Image: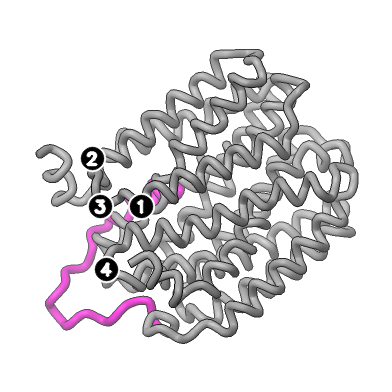
């Protein structure tokens, strides 16, 4: 099953990996950019906001024409990343906005295509997210290759990689979902989703993207400040690599475990790790790296499962793009708020209470998010 999905959609997965690389680039680059532009945490947080405002707009329109969104998204990402090679701090906001616009359009379209490529949505979406994670892992490696003082080289190489990914995506054979994400339901056959259910999933998507990017964006800086022996690129690589491995394992064993139990267990472990970061001021380097790895392992299954729950509930809902767009509000606010709290209280340890609160809220809402049939399976 996994091989068949890969054979059909590999150009999409390659493009997704390229987009994944530029999605997470701000995290491993942030210490160098803070030094380069002489800015504080609260100012650095505005770069996350600019990026995710772009992602909000991109996701809002992405499901109207999936093929156009995928290809135009890659093109916009190339433009934004290439601009960053020469941008100063003010212009960088526009460049990150354009990059976010392109990344979100491409990834949202890819999510929908992958979600409808197989009746086993959790596995197909896990593969899609694995490809994104491969790009996320490659990002800190490229940062290390370019060197912390040569961000221009990083941006130029990253732009070239996304251009290649977009060119490959243009060769993708057109599945039925490339033109429309859903088949219109027969009149009266499907009831419209309630506003409460839509707000529930929109809120959980918002919290997840906000939490993932607050941790992925700030943990490298947190690690360097907590232990001078740590390297930002190494911490970022460990975070995204462990997330990738977690999703690979999930894709292989999803049919053996309860999706509801896995969702809750992942959130519980992630909350425990973030609380550890808040409570322990100066962990040893091995302890710090181990905690970062565990955080990636814990967060890995959450998004594929959340999207699978969403599609199981709203498979015929025409406003999927708006639901995905809501997630970008989390990416625009939670990383920024983490930086604001850090600056106000004088340390990232306190700032990490922001994602901790978001994870706790997701855990509290988990009973309402998991479909009823999976609730029953998890209790047997």
Are the residues tagged 2 and 3 within 8 Å (C-beta)?
no
Q: Quadrant of the N terminus?
A: bottom left
Secondary element at image label 4: loop
4 vs 3, front mark = 3
4 vs 1, front mark = 1
- Label 2 to label 3: alpha-carbon separation: 20 Å
Q: Taking 313 as reference, is 67 left or right?
A: right
Secondary element at image label 2: helix
- Label 4 to label 2: alpha-carbon separation: 24 Å
Q: Name the residue under label 4.
A: 119
Q: How crowded is mark 1: few (under 14 residues within 10 Å), some or many (20 or more)?
A: few
Q: Name the residue under label 1.
A: 252
The disc at residue 367 is 2
Q: Which of 235 and 193 is in front in this view?
A: 235
Q: Is residue 159 visible?
A: yes
- Label 4 to label 3: alpha-carbon separation: 13 Å
Magenta stretch: residue 181 in it? yes
Residue 34 sits in quarter: top right
Residue 204 at what x, y percent from top left? 38, 46
- Label 3 to label 1: alpha-carbon separation: 8 Å
- Earlier sequence position, callout 2 versus callout 1: 1
- Earlier sequence position, callout 2 versus callout 3: 3
């Amino acid at each position: 099953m996994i091989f068949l999905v890969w054979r059909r959609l590999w150009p999409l997965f390659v493009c997704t990996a390229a987009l994944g690389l530029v999605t997470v680039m701000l995290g491993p680059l942030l210490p160098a950019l803070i030094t380069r532009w002489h800015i504080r945490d609260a100012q650095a947080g505005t770069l996350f906001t600019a990026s995710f405002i772009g992602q909000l707009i991109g996701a809002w329109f992405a499901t109207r024409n999936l093929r156009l969104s995928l290809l135009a998204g890659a093109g916009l990402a190339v433009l934004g990343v290439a601009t960053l090679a020469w941008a100063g701090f003010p212009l960088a906001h526009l460049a990150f906005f354009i990059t976010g616009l392109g990344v979100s359009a491409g990834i949202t379209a890819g999510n929908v295509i992958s979600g409808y490529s197989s009746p086993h949505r959790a596995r197909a979406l896990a593969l899609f997210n694995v490809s994104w994670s491969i790009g996320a892992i490659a990002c800190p490696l490229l940062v290390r290759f370019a060197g912390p003082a040569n961000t221009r080289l990083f941006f130029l190489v990253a732009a070239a990689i996304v251009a290649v990914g977009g060119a490959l995506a243009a060769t993708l054979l057109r599945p039925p979902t490339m033109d429309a994400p859903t088949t219109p339901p027969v009149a009266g056959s499907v009831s419209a989703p309630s506003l409460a259910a839509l707000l529930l999933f929109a809120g959980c998507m918002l919290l997840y993207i906000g939490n993932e990017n607050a941790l992925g964006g700030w943990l490298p800086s947190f690690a360097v400040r907590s232990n001078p022996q740590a390297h930002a690129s190494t911490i970022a690589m460990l975070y995204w690599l462990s997330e990738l491995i977690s999703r690979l394992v999930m894709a292989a064993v999803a049919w053996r475990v309860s999706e509801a139990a896995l969702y809750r267990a992942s959130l519980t472990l992630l909350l425990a790790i973030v609380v550890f970061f808040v409570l322990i001021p100066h962990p040893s380097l091995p302890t710090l790296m181990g905690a970062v790895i565990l955080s990636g392992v814990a967060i890995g299954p959450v998004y594929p499962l959340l999207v699978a729950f969403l599609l199981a509930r709203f498979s015929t809902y025409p406003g999927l793009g708006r639901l995905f767009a809501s997630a970008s509000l989390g990416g625009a606010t939670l990383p920024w708020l983490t930086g604001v709290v850090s600056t106000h209280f004088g340390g990232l340890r306190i700032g990490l209470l922001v994602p901790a609160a978001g994870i706790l809220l997701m855990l509290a809402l988990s009973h309402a998010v998991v479909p009823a049939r999976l609730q029953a399976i998890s209790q047997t």
